[in-house]
Image (cartoon, coloured by chain):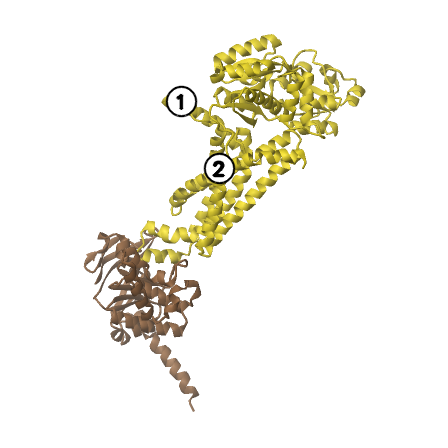
Chain colours: A brown, B yellow
């Protein structure tokens, strides 16, 4: 569904690499999590897919077609995009926000209206919210709207960049689970960038680890959890287990 | 009611409507120019920097200079279109005022708009790209709607500036509320000055509040409020446009006047003569001194009164001081040959520069002539109008008499006389036909070396009116008919501090005094 072929991107006139010769394929209906330190290139990788960033060299393919062949805006209308900043349009109602991409494509109004109601249900928000402005919603509610907006035009691909980074842990967990559910029911191909190894392990079918603009590990969560030749990767993947162990120790200490 | 206030109110429909139309047109044009600039500059530092720098630079040019500079520029352009296409436009009045005010209105709109768009939340801009908006859709659906309230705040600032600055359009021949201020200042008529300022302030406040209503409607997303503001503003402009314009009666005569009392009186007198002959007349008063001649030569005025010495120095650029008869003959010939302007004749009196002193001081110092003055001048302070020190007459006086004063100060003519009487200066360059010389019993110093050229008041006709029988018939009785004593008294009717008369009343008095029918 998505292919990167030898993609390189430098910043600062070649001073530093964001992506170094990255090749990467995502099969249809897979949920891929991309993890790595800040500055490892994971956000750049994600943005080359919907052309928010254009690579210096290499080629990106979406659904078998080179991404360069169609205008960036029409490519983006068929790729859902959710990010930490959410970026709801403050002057538009929730209904207008959700319906923006179908409206840009030119769907008939009644179809847009029906689709907006369907989506507000799908992201578990009350329909009364449709007439409100973004400022009247909480952070978690706003990100649900952000997800609904990304999915409105029935994209085959959903890109998420730290989508839950600014949310409290409870909301974060609930929204993560809902994203996975939407991924299943809407038969999406999902790429999610995250800092959170546990979130990646619990949601993704496949985890890609990046470091200094390169992919250093790529596999199913289970296989990565059970060890990796790269010590930094195995250290990283071991993090959830070590944290769980500390929690368990804490609980047992206090046990009667 | 106070008669001065009454006469001010009588002019209100015309002055206010002209002011509203000029301001509205300038603001509308300013918005129309600013928006494309804003759109081009918003995402490009390479465009933004020079555009903002140019707009700021314009803002630093003193407004009256900007207005004045547009006149010669347009006059040149107009002459060019005449040569190329056989068609010319009016370079005096509305057009130069409109262009200057438009330039002034750009900066606040542009700066606020650019600031608003640059400070939009980057997350919103990223989302706009992410959902698949084209650059145009981002502009129309996201950037402009979100920048609108701040953009409106810029429009408000512009509107207030434009309404205030439009009062300065009077000296380039555009009627505005500034006519109250300039006329009032010249005639020491503070009621008119305060009245003009008050109306301009009220207009600015009302406009600002209506624009604030639009801004509120945009910010709160209440279109009803915004439309209400727009409708009231448009209704105001439409009302102004409906006020019948005395200025654009077809086939009418345009009488000009420079910016002092005598000129207003003579313009009114000439206008009364032409009206009596059954023809419509427009008065364009308060014009800058050299601007009046250019406007006449360009057929934008039909007739006005100028002074031989002024024309000799400023138009012919001569420095010599010939006799009265030679100067008039030479002027008549050269103005006709060079500009097609007709010197119809002299009115009979002179409005020359004279050096004048308080009687007590002149007596105490023993000063009766300029030569006497030269002895004591290093201890004295000289006051003059805004032009005098730049004139050849002043240079010649200094050289021929060896005059050196302790200090030189410049005043509006009105304030120059008060400055002399309140002992802020000791000598002034007064005007020989001024009623205040007699009223204040000033001593006029003799000019034994005949350095000061004659300043005979002369009637000038525009090239297109050279053979006009109506003007010639109406104005012939004025030639040689006004002795300096009567002109002084007419001037004093307007300039005196108490029981002031309007220029129109003084003109009627003068007409009766010289036994015109």
Q: Position of residue B208 (x, y in %)?
A: 53, 46
Evaluate whether label 1 is on the same chain as label 2.
yes
Instruction: In the rendered structure, find residue B82 and report the number of the disc placed on it.
Output: 1
Residue for point 65% across, 17% down: B352
Sequence order check: which comes first, mark 1 or mark 2?
Answer: 1
Residue for point 47% across, 40% down: B238
Q: Position of residue B148 (x, y in %)?
A: 44, 51
Q: Residue furthest right?
A: B364
Can residue B404 be seen from the camera position used here? no
Residues under numbered marks 1 and 2 in contact, where contact means CB atoms less than 8 Å apart: no
Relative to residue A60, is residue B388 drawn left or right?
A: right
Can residue B187 be seen from the camera position used here? yes
Residue at disc 1, secondary structure? helix
Residue for point 29% across, 61% down: A110
Q: Position of residue B115 (x, y in %)?
A: 45, 49
Residue at disc 2, secondary structure? helix
Say above or below: B320 vs A222: above
Report the Cα–Cα distance between label 1 and label 2.
31 Å
Quadrant location of the N terminus of chain B? top right
Q: Residues within 10 Å of mark 1 (few under 14, many from 20)?
A: few
Q: Which quadrant of the view contains residue A134?
A: bottom left
């Amino acid at each position: 569904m998505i292919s990167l072929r030898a993609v390189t991107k430098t910043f600062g006139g070649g001073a530093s690499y964001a992506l170094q010769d990255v090749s990467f394929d995502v099969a249809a209906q897979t949920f891929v999590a991309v993890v790595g330190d800040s500055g490892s290139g994971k956000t750049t990788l994600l943005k080359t897919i919907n052309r928010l960033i254009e690579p210096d060299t290499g080629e990106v393919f979406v659904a078998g077609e080179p991404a360069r062949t169609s205008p960036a805006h029409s490519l983006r209308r068929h790729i859902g995009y959710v990010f930490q900043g959410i970026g709801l349009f403050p002057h538009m109602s929730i209904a207008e926000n959700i319906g923006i991409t179908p409206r840009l494509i030119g769907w008939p109004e009644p179809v847009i209206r029906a689709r907006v109601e369907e989506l507000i249900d799908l992201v578990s928000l009350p329909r009364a919210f449709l007439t409100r402005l973004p400022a009247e919603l909480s952070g978690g509610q706003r990100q649900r709207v952000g997800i609904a907006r990304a999915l409105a035009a029935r994209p085959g691909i959903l890109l998420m960049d730290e989508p839950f980074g600014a949310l409290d842990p409870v909301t974060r967990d609930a929204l993560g689970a809902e994203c996975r559910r939407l991924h299943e029911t809407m038969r999406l191909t999902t790429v999610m960038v995250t800092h959170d190894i546990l979130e990646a392990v619990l949601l993704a079918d496949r985890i890609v680890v990046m470091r200094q603009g390169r992919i250093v590990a790529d596999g199913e969560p289970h296989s990565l959890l059970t060890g990796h030749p790269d010590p930094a990767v195995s250290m990283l993947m071991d993090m959830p287990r070590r944290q769980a162990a500390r929690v368990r120790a804490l609980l047992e200490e206090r046990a009667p | 009611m106070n008669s001065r206030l009454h006469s001010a109110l009588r002019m209100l429909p015309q002055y206010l409507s002209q002011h509203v139309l000029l301001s509205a047109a300038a603001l509308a044009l300013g918005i129309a120019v600013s928006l494309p600039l804003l759109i081009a500059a918003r995402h490009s530092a390479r465009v933004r920097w020079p555009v903002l720098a140019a707009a700021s630079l314009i803002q630093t040019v003193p407004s009256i200079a900007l207005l004045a500079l547009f006149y010669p520029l347009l006059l040149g352009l107009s002459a060019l279109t005449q040569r190329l296409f056989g068609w010319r436009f009016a370079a005096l009045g509305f057009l130069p005022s409109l262009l200057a005010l438009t330039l002034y209105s750009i900066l606040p709109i542009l700066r606020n708009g650019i600031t608003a768009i640059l400070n939009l939340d980057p997350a919103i801009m990223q989302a706009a790209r992410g959902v698949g908006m084209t650059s145009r859709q981002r502009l129309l659906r996201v950037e402009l709607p979100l920048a609108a309230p701040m953009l409106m705040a810029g429009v408000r600032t512009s509107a207030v500036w434009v309404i205030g600055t439009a009062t300065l359009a009077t000296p380039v021949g555009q009627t505005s509320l500034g006519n109250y201020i300039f006329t009032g200042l010249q005639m020491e008529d503070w009621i008119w000055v305060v009245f003009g300022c008050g109306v301009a302030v009220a207009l600015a406040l009302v406009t600002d509040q209506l624009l604030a209503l639009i801004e509120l409607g945009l910010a709160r997303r209440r279109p009803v409020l915004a439309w209400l503001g727009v409708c009231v503003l448009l209704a105001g402009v439409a009302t102004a446009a409906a006020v019948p314009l005395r200025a654009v009666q077809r086939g009418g005569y345009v009488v000009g006047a420079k910016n002092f009392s005598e000129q207003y009186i003579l313009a009114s007198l000439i206008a009364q003569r032409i009206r009596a002959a059954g023809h419509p007349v427009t008065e364009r008063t308060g014009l800058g001194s050299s601007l009046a001649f250019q406007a006449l030569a360009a057929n934008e005025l039909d007739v006005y009164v100028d002074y031989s010495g002024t024309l000799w120095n400023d138009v012919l650029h001569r420095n010599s001081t010939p006799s009265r008869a030679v100067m008039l003959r030479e002027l008549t010939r050269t103005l006709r040959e060079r500009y097609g302007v007709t010197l119809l004749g002299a009115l009979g009196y002179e409005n020359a520069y004279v050096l004048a002193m308080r009687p007590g001081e002149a007596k105490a110092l023993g000063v009766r002539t300029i030569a006497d003055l030269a002895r004591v001048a290093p201890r004295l302070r000289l006051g003059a109008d805004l032009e005098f020190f730049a004139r050849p007459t002043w240079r010649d006086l200094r050289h021929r008499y060896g005059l050196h004063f302790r200090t030189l100060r410049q005043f509006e003519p009105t304030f120059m006389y008060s400055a002399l009487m309140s002992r802020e200066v000791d000598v002034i360059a007064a005007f020989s036909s001024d009623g205040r010389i007699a009223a204040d019993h000033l001593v006029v110093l003799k000019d034994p070396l005949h350095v000061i050229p004659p300043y005979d008041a002369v009637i000038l006709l525009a090239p297109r009116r050279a053979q006009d029988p109506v003007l010639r018939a109406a104005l012939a009785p004025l030639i040689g008919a006004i002795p300096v004593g009567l002109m002084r008294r007419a001037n004093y009717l307007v300039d005196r501090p108490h029981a002031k008369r309007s220029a129109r009343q003084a003109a009627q008095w003068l007409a009766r005094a010289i036994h015109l029918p």
